[in-house]
Amino acid sequence: MKSIKTFRLAVGAVIVATSMTVWSQTSEPANAPGASAMTASGSAAPATGRKANRALRRQVYNAIAKHKEISAGNISVIAKDGAVTLNGTVTNAAQVGKVAEIAKSVPGVISVTNKLAVDQPFGGQ
């Protein structure tokens, strides 16, 4: 009975040791040229992308806010790699196209998907 427990413990230790060795290996050797630069740029790229998307989103919001005739409180802006999506509602139909044109005029905007709708009061009038 004692030998079976010892055997199981030894097998478990071998499995853990093998798992740790396999898990710690990478697809490229550590001394490969450019490996550290690739790792550094790979880890920094998502943060830079998110920062750029947030900055573009703020620029679009600021451009819309400069036009006092547009109520931007019900408009949401999603920016991803220069593609901007507008969601929400505006007070009249003329503002739907106007907001899209404002967004297109912001530097860095590549495309605009306009999903804005006209906010109708209760009763549909």
Image: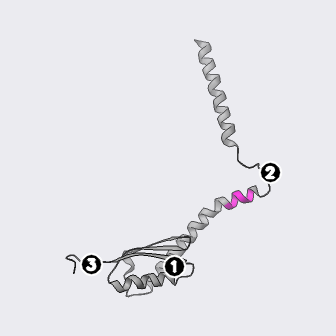
Q: Main secondary structure of the magenta part?
A: helix
**Residue annotated with mark 2:** 31
* Residue that lies at the very extreme toward the left in this rendered image: 123
Crowding at dot 1, Cα within 10 Å, few <14 / some 14-19 / many 20+, comes out as: some
Q: In this figure, what is the number of numbered marks?
A: 3
Three-letter residue code for mark 2: Asn
- Residue 102: x, y in percent? 47, 84
Three-letter residue code for mark 1: Gln
Three-letter residue code for mark 3: Gln
**Residue annotated with mark 3:** 120
Relative to residue 66, is residue 37 depicted above or below?
above
Crowding at dot 2, Cα within 10 Å, few <14 / some 14-19 / many 20+, comes out as: few
Q: Earlier in the sequence, mark 1 or mark 3?
A: 1
Cβ atoms at labels 2 and 1 below 8 Å apart: no
Distance between mark 2 and mark 1 Cα atoms: 43 Å
Question: Magenta residues?
Answer: 36-41
Label 3 sits on a secondary structure element that is: loop
Label 1 sits on a secondary structure element that is: helix
- Residue 71: x, y in percent? 36, 82
Crowding at dot 3, Cα within 10 Å, few <14 / some 14-19 / many 20+, comes out as: few
Distance between mark 1 and mark 3 Cα atoms: 28 Å
**Residue at left 56%, top 70%?**
81
Relative to residue 119, is residue 6 depicted above or below?
above
Q: Give the quarter of the figure containing the N terminus.
A: top right
- Residue 28: x, y in percent? 74, 49
Q: Earlier in the sequence, mark 3 or mark 2?
A: 2
Label 2 sits on a secondary structure element that is: loop
**Residue annotated with mark 1:** 59
